[in-house]
Image: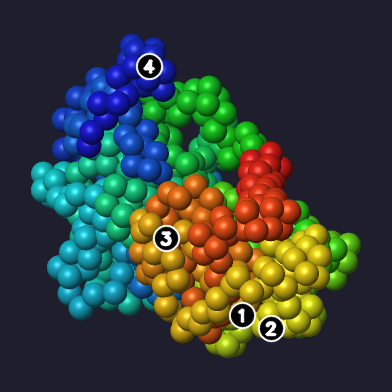
């Protein structure tokens, strides 16, 4: 545990303040009914708070070991749920608060089952449900499970175990009662003995806080990253803690503190703020209900000071829509024929990009869905960009899958992009839709840019076909404003070149000064390597020019340009162009101006991208 970072923290300071404030409190009695517990130092007092990213604040006797006692009950219940499922467990042990003391010999009047797993009857019944062939194996599985929660190998305090084993007649009576009602089907003494051992596991406040943080973190220990309980059973465990965890003070506790918690007769209290924190407090003096007096005070004050009450959370889930735009506002990085650009300006509003962010769960995904289906005109393309999504739960993944299927059925192309960090999304969409072709299609593109380019191509459809081949120079951006004669002169200066797919047309770092007019196909612009680790910065299609920077300034090439499929170019050599200055000065000026305009268009697009991507954020 490394908590050096907490030295100057106001959080650490507040915990120290609480420790100093309640250390003089000497109310309550150390438990003596288990003789060994009476030897505890009544002054021992530790407080720990662990976050769901594994940071542990600690004050006082935070590393002193004591026995876990009843705090073991919810964790063993979790293991029993993992082993047998909730249905089986419900048939064995209820989930209703009893209002009785923890050691009451009480079973449900009708069913004969213990009322809940947090009182001794329910806890012993629960221990009996842990799958094992022998009592040793059962104990080892229990120890193993606790060690996963704590992130270190825990051990049993033999003195406390033997002490309780020698005196625990009441619990043995409970064991036999459970056997009588067939809640336990094995020899009851062995199960009660395992129960005594689970109660005698030695822990520190730091362990308790981390165990709490593991429950707060959907069952994954935040320090080790190892799962201690199935994700879907965390809520079952926390629910019984919330309703029954503090013995017959459970109602008062949830009312005042508002966090699921569990206490033990050795003086430990563990509280959990789901999704956020685990708290461990240790002080052996107990009140008449068996709860640590100081721990109660500390938790109450912590909850009030930091506003931790579960039923009044300090924030509402944020809208997860980070940025939305259409292709009319921002196109892909493809530089297109002027006529195509015009077309996209007019109909690009049918292609939507929705950048999502933060944690996607029901309440953060719902506004996205409302937004997407509420778009005024029937969309033709919908890109759901997950680049800034930090997590996604099952519900959100399924809702988005349903949304995608629905849009697809209404002839809208849908793509989830930047999903590599969210394997959960793809897995859930695949299981939910049970349509591998559709799923492959939805995740076809890694980048939003590639998906946008595809949506634009589809939208352009026919309009695009006219420009994808042929060499009607009249429509090229470089020939704008040329007379028929000028066009003929210009055409005579060009040489045709053909490139096969993957061929490098311009190589990064070389000194070549030709200007390329694309007359067929598409070329890609790559930084770094040509493919693979390189980065595709953009692409150019028919009617556009590439290479004009080095053409004008004579510097080395700043990127690789590669043929994507069959490509034909009309090439203008710099020497030929310079000669025009003498022979056809007006033509020379017009061409120069058109190259300038082409550069200006690219610069304008960059400016517009920056404006959209930075300023329009919700
Ligand atoms: N081992 C103790 C018992 O069964 C645990 C009780 C508790 O911590 N409340 O009596």
Of residues 316 and 83, the one drawn nearer to the viewer in this rendering: 316
Q: Label 1 vs label 2: CA separation?
A: 7 Å
Q: Position of residue 100 (x, y in %)?
A: 49, 46
Residue 287's tag is none
Task: Tell me which label, 1 or 3, sits earlier in the chain.
Answer: 3
Q: Label 4 vs label 2: CA separation?
A: 75 Å
Q: Name the secondary structure under disc 4.
A: helix
Task: Tell me which label, 3 or 4, sits earlier in the chain.
Answer: 4
Q: Which residue is mark 1?
A: 520
Residue 470's tag is 2
Q: Which residue is mark 3?
A: 512
Q: Label 3 vs label 4: CA separation?
A: 66 Å
Picture layout, residue 557 above or below residue 334: above
Q: Residue at x 52, y 26 (%)?
A: 306
Q: Name the secondary structure under disc 2.
A: loop
Which residue in the rendered view is the most extreme toward the front?
A: 583
Residue 13's tag is 4
Picture layout, residue 224 above or below residue 85: above
Of residues 148 and 542, the one drawn nearer to the viewer in this rendering: 542
Q: How busy is the neighbourhood of tag 2: few (under 14 within 10 Å), some, or many (20 plus)?
A: some
Q: How busy is the neighbourhood of tag 3: few (under 14 within 10 Å), some, or many (20 plus)?
A: some
Which residue in the rendered view is the most extreme toward the right?
A: 376
Does any atom of ligand 1 lie closer than 8 Å to the CB of label 1?
Answer: no
Instruction: Classify the position of the N terminus by image quarter.
Output: top left
**Count of numbered tags:** 4
Q: Residue 451 falls in which quadrant of the image?
A: bottom right
Q: Name the secondary structure under disc 3.
A: loop
Q: Label 4 vs label 1: CA separation?
A: 70 Å
Question: Marks 2 and 1: in contact by CB < 8 Å?
Answer: yes
Q: Position of residue 590 (x, y in %)?
A: 72, 54
Left/right of residue 416 with respect to residue 131 in the rendered view = right
């Amino acid at each position: 545990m490394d908590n050096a970072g907490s030295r100057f923290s106001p959080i650490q300071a507040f915990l120290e303040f609480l420790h100093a404030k309640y250390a003089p409190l000497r109310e309550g009695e150390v438990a003596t009914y288990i003789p060994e517990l009476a030897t505890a130092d009544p002054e021992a007092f530790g407080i720990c708070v662990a976050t769901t990213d594994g940071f542990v604040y600690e004050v006082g006797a935070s590393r002193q070991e004591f026995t876990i006692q009843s705090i073991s009950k919810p964790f063993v219940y979790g293991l029993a749920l993992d082993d047998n499922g909730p249905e089986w467990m419900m048939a064995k042990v209820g989930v209703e608060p009893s209002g009785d003391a923890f050691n009451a010999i009480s079973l449900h009047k009708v069913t004969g089952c213990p009322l809940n797993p947090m009182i001794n009857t329910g806890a012993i019944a629960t221990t009996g449900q842990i799958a094992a062939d022998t009592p040793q194996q059962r104990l080892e599985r229990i120890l193993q499970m606790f060690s996963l929660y704590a992130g270190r190998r825990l051990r049993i305090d033999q003195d406390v175990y033997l002490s309780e084993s020698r005196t625990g007649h009441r619990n043995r009576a409970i064991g036999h009662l459970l056997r009588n009602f067939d809640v336990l089907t094995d020899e009851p003494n062995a199960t009660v003995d395992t129960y005594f051992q689970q109660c005698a596991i030695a822990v520190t406040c730091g362990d308790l806080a981390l165990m709490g943080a593991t429950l707060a973190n959907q069952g994954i220990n935040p320090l080790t990253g190892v799962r201690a309980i199935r994700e879907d059973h965390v809520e079952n465990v926390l629910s019984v803690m919330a309703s029954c965890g503090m013995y017959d003070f459970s109602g008062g506790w949830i009312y005042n503190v508002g966090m699921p918690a569990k206490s033990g007769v050795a003086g430990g209290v563990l509280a959990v703020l789901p999704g956020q924190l685990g708290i461990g407090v240790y002080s052996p003096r107990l009140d008449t209900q068996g709860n640590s007096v100081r721990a109660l005070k500390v938790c109450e004050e912590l909850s009030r000071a930091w506003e931790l009450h579960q039923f009044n959370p300090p924030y509402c889930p944020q809208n997860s829509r980070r940025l939305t735009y259409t292709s009319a506002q921002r196109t892909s990085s493809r530089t297109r024929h002027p006529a195509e650009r015009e077309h996209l300006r007019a109909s690009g509003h049918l292609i939507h990009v929705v950048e999502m962010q933060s944690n996607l769960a029901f309440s953060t995904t719902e506004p996205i869905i409302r937004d997407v289906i509420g778009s005024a005109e029937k969309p033709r393309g919908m890109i759901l960009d997950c680049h800034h999504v930090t997590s996604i739960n099952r519900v959100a993944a399924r809702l988005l899958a349903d949304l995608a299927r629905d849009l697809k059925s209404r002839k809208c192309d849908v793509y989830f992009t930047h999903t590599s960090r969210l394997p959960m999304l793809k897995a859930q969409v695949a299981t939910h839709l049970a349509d591998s072709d559709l799923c492959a299609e939805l995740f076809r593109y890694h980048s939003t840019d590639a998906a946008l380019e595809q949506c634009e191509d589809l939208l352009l459809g026919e309009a695009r076909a006219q420009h994808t081949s042929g060499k009607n120079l009249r429509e090229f951006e470089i020939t704008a404003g040329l007379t028929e004669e000028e066009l003929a002169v210009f055409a005579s200066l060009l040489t045709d070149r053909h490139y096969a797919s993957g061929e490098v047309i311009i190589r990064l770092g070389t000194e070549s000064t030709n200007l390329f007019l694309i007359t067929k196909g598409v070329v890609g612009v790559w930084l770094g390597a040509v493919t693979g680790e390189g980065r595709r910065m953009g692409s150019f299609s028919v009617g556009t020019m590439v290479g004009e920077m080095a053409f004008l300034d004579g510097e080395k090439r700043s990127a690789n340009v590669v043929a994507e499929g069959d490509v034909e170019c009309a090439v203008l050599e710099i020497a030929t162009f310079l000669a025009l200055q003498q022979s056809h000065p007006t033509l020379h000026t017009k061409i120069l101006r058109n190259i300038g305009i082409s550069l200006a268009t690219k610069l304008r697009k960059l400016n517009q991208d920056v404006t959209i991507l930075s300023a329009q954020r919700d």
